[in-house]
Image: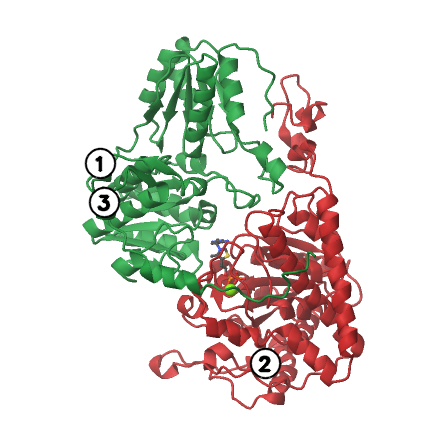
């Protein structure tokens, strides 16, 4: 079948990336094959490939040496660096603001996972979509939502990207095609798949999309979410209908206090792609250049109409699940192991070693981002609270949905309606 | 200035681990000697502990109920005491594990399913309604489903629209379910024990914001044989001028409102429903026949809600006793906003209850905002 050939082609360069600096062989596709004699792997038309061997799965704690990356230009490297630094500094600022009572509720920070957001989202066009979870601030930033609008949203201010109505777990920005932070596990995946369906529909039925191909949707979600049925349902439909989507698993090894290995019968998530006929790729999610390379391939493949890809990024969160999490179950040595593989430090080292920029140039990027984030806080702090009238706005796009009042007129036509003083 | 604490990775959580090891095992007896007060959290934890120890067919399942000791620490200590066969940490798959628990209940086990919050029960609602609630009827009584679905329900603080919602009316709509909503530590202990012992599916709606609240508690309530009857409301405060009916956290608000009203010469009777389904129509109507005025209070959306059902029970049974239109206090008819000022407008406040009670007594008050 045409698609399978295409998939195999796609995977070749990824395999090359792996062989660059890592001589360990990927684990066999069925580790316990001898225990399950009747589950013989079907003759493989589709290969799954590890872009880097896994720390968790192999039990090997040595950080793999930097693989041979496809060349990255100075401009690209600095763009990646700036975006990752923005993600990090923004989130650190959120923690401070949370402890000062400027934001509230559940605040889930992204520290440590920046290479995934940056490596993927920076490969997108404006028209491409991102669907995120409750851990969504940095996806929003990578997609281009200004830091001040995200910060103001977190402060619950009228100038936020959702006017203070959404909050930390629910970032939306239609102009950036950021289709939401979804707070429930798995629920973003079908919505993302639906956005990809619409892209294909616009292209094939409405003949609307550009010459480059289909608009692509990225669905971001965690390891814990891969045990939820909606994940499997959507892998099936996305492949069945060859939808332009990339399922990006941010495997940070934990779902709150539940270790991935304790929750998942076969922890190698990327292998679930081939089970549905789509390629599955595992990549070192602490290495933005590797992530970027895998992202480019998967996104282009989707754009060409060749269908979905499942990408498992092995990463780590440097903070608790949310700012309310005591984070007592993760072992200190595991934390320090991943802290030593900080994706920002790694990129910095690479940039300097490759003479792409000097230390002081990187410093000035950090300084610039410091200022951007400071300015975002000042902006958010100075912004007005949402007015009372906002309470009843946006429940419907057509407020006639509030129905007809005792006077026979639509309730929304009552001048008192949006002042929140009319009975609804 | 604002950048001071930047680039600190991780935190120092070791202390917590040490503390956990030092934590004394929870047991009923730990409370009986000293405590005259108990938090709702301790009440729930001790009820689970005692019922598990009394009946080996009772087991717990849910996300983070074991090693993490519960997302809200309600199951603290139970994994240590009963082991991983009876305290099961599940993957994040509500539809799956809820269905599995229902199947286990078909086969005579007594699962207690914890939803990390009831919001997530939306992913399992098919099994709660179609597999749990209807089986006894469909099987003509051959298969009963002794299961408890429990977890925090209702508005929390600052968590936005998806995480802040009350499901009392949703589940109370369904024949075959019993729906309980404790307010105090006594309610929590007595109703949870009753729920676990009950032969039918019970939806047990807790409230996160009440978990840490302490209530006085009697020796009788601390006894491991204690339980409360399902379907009986409690008169929390007697009064003669107006009846205020509430459940869960709103009972506390109603009591505060009654205190304020008493200073202004209005004697309010406060009824804690405890059970949303079955609804204690007798208690509701007895009180309304005495006071002739009614205010209903709920946190959830107004339309087709618990207040509407209470009001209908009064219209059907005690219409001629009413001296004033019934007042309904409910959350605003909007998804919960995130911004703190809007959020406050979207949930009932004590003042709203006070004003409504005065209106029923024809004391002039300015028109209350719905919010
Ligand atoms: C349906 C549902 N059940 C439970 C939760 C509570 N919850 C929030 S985040 C989370 C863990 C998710 O872990 P993972 O998918 O690995 O993502 P991560 O937080 O690690 O990024 C859980 C159980 C939820 N949000 N939705
Ligand atoms: Mg995770």
Task: Examine the rendering and report whether any part of residue A268 can be seen.
Answer: no
SS under mark 3: loop
Q: Which residue is mark 2?
A: A51
Which chain does tag 1 point to? B
- Closer to us: A370 or B322: A370
Q: Residue at x 65, y 33 (%)?
A: A392
Quadrant of residue B176 within the rendered picture: top left
Q: CA distance from mark 1 to mark 2?
A: 64 Å
SS under mark 1: helix
| Chain B shade in the render | green
Image coordinates of residue A142 in percent, x first then y, are 70, 62
Q: Which residue is mark 3?
A: B142
- Closer to us: B220 or A313: B220
Q: Which residue is mark 1?
A: B219
Location of residue A164 with respect to A42 vertically, above or below: above
Residue A34, numbered label: none
- Closer to us: A24 or A201: A24
């Amino acid at each position: 079948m045409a698609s399978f050939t295409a998939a195999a082609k796609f995977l070749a360069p990824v395999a090359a990336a792996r062989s660059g600096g890592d001589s360990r062989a990927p684990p066999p596709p069925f580790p316990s094959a001898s225990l399950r004699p009747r589950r013989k792997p079907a003759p493989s038309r589709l290969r799954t490939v590890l872009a880097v061997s896994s720390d968790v799965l192999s039990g090997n704690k040595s950080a793999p040496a930097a693989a041979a990356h496809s060349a990255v230009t100075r401009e690209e490297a600095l763009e990646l660096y700036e975006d990752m630094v923005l993600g990090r500094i923004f989130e650190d600022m959120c923690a401070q603001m949370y402890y000062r009572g400027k934001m509230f509720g559940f605040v889930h920070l992204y520290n440590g996972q920046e290479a995934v957001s940056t490596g993927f989202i920076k490969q997108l066009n404006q028209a491409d979509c991102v669907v995120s979870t409750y851990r969504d601030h940095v996806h929003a930033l990578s997609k281009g939502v200004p830091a001040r609008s995200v910060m103001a949203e977190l402060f619950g201010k009228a100038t936020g990207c959702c006017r203070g109505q959404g909050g930390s777990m629910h970032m939306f920005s239609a102009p950036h095609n950021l289709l939401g932070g979804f707070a429930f596990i798995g629920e973003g995946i079908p919505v993302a798949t639906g956005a990809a369906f619409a892209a294909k529909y616009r292209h094939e039925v409405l003949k609307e999309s550009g010459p480059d191909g289909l608009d692509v949707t990225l669905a971001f979600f965690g390891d814990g979410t891969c045990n939820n049925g909606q994940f499997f349902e959507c892998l099936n439909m996305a492949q069945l209908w060859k939808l332009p989507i990339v399922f990006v698993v941010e495997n940070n090894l934990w779902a709150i206090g539940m270790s991935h290995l304790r929750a998942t019968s076969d922890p190698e998530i990327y292998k679930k792609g081939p089970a549905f006929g789509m390629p599955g790729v595992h990549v070192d999610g602490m290495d933005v250049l590797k992530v970027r390379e895998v992202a480019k391939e998967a996104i282009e493949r989707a754009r060409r109409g060749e269908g979905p890809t499942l990408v498992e990024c092995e990463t780590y969160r440097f903070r608790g699940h949310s700012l309310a999490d005591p984070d007592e179950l993760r072992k200190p040595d595991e934390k320090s192991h991943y802290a030593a593989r900080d994706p920002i430090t790694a990129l910095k080292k690479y940039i300097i070693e490759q003479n792409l920029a000097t230390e002081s140039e990187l410093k000035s990027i950090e300084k610039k981002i410091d200022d951007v984030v400071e300015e975002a806080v000042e902006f958010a702090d100075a912004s007005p609270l949402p007015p009372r009238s906002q309470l009843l706005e946006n429940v419907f796009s057509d407020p006639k949905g509030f129905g007809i009042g005792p006077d026979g007129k639509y309730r929304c036509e009552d001048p008192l309606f949006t002042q929140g003083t009319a009975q609804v | 200035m604002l950048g001071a604490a930047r680039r600190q990775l991780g935190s120092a959580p070791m202390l917590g681990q040490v503390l956990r090891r030092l934590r004394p095992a929870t047991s009923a007896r730990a409370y009986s000697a000293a405590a005259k007060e108990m938090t709702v959290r301790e009440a729930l934890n001790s009820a689970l502990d005692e019922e598990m120890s009394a009946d080996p067919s009772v087991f717990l399942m849910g996300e983070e109920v074991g090693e993490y000791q519960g997302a809200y620490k309600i199951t603290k200590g139970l994994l240590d005491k009963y082991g991983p066969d009876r305290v099961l940490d599940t993957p994040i798959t509500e539809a799956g594990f809820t269905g599995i628990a229902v199947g286990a209940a078909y086969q005579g086990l007594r699962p207690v399913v914890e939803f990390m919050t009831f919001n997530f029960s939306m992913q399992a609602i098919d099994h709660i309604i179609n597999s749990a609630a209807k089986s006894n009827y469909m099987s003509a009584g051959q298969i009963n489903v002794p299961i408890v679905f429990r977890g925090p329900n209702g508005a929390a603080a600052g968590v936005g629209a998806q995480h802040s919602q009350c499901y009392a009316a949703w589940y109370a709509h369904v024949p075959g379910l019993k729906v309980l909503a404790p307010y105090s530590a006594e309610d929590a202990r007595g109703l949870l024990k009753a729920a676990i012992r009950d032969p039918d599916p019970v939806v047990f709606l807790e409230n996160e914001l009440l978990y840490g609240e302490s209530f006085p508690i009697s020796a009788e309530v601390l006894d491991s044989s204690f339980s409360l009857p399902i379907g009986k409301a409690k008169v929390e405060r007697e009064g003669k001028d107006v009846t205020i009916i509430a459940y869960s956290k709103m009972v506390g608000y109603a009591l505060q409102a009654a205190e304020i009203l008493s200073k202004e010469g209005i004697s309010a009777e406060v009824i804690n429903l405890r059970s949303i389904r079955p609804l204690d129509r007798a208690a509701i109507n007895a009180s309304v026949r005495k006071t002739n005025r009614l205010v209903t209070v709920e946190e959830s959306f107004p339309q087709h809600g618990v207040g509407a059902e209470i009001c209908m029970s009064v219209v059907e049974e005690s219409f001629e006793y009413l001296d004033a239109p019934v007042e309904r206090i409910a959350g605003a008819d909007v998804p919960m906003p995130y911004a703190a000022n809007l959020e406050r407008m979207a949930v009932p406040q004590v003042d709203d209850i006070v004003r409504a009670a005065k209106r029923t007594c024809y004391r002039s008050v300015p028109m209350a905002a719905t919010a």
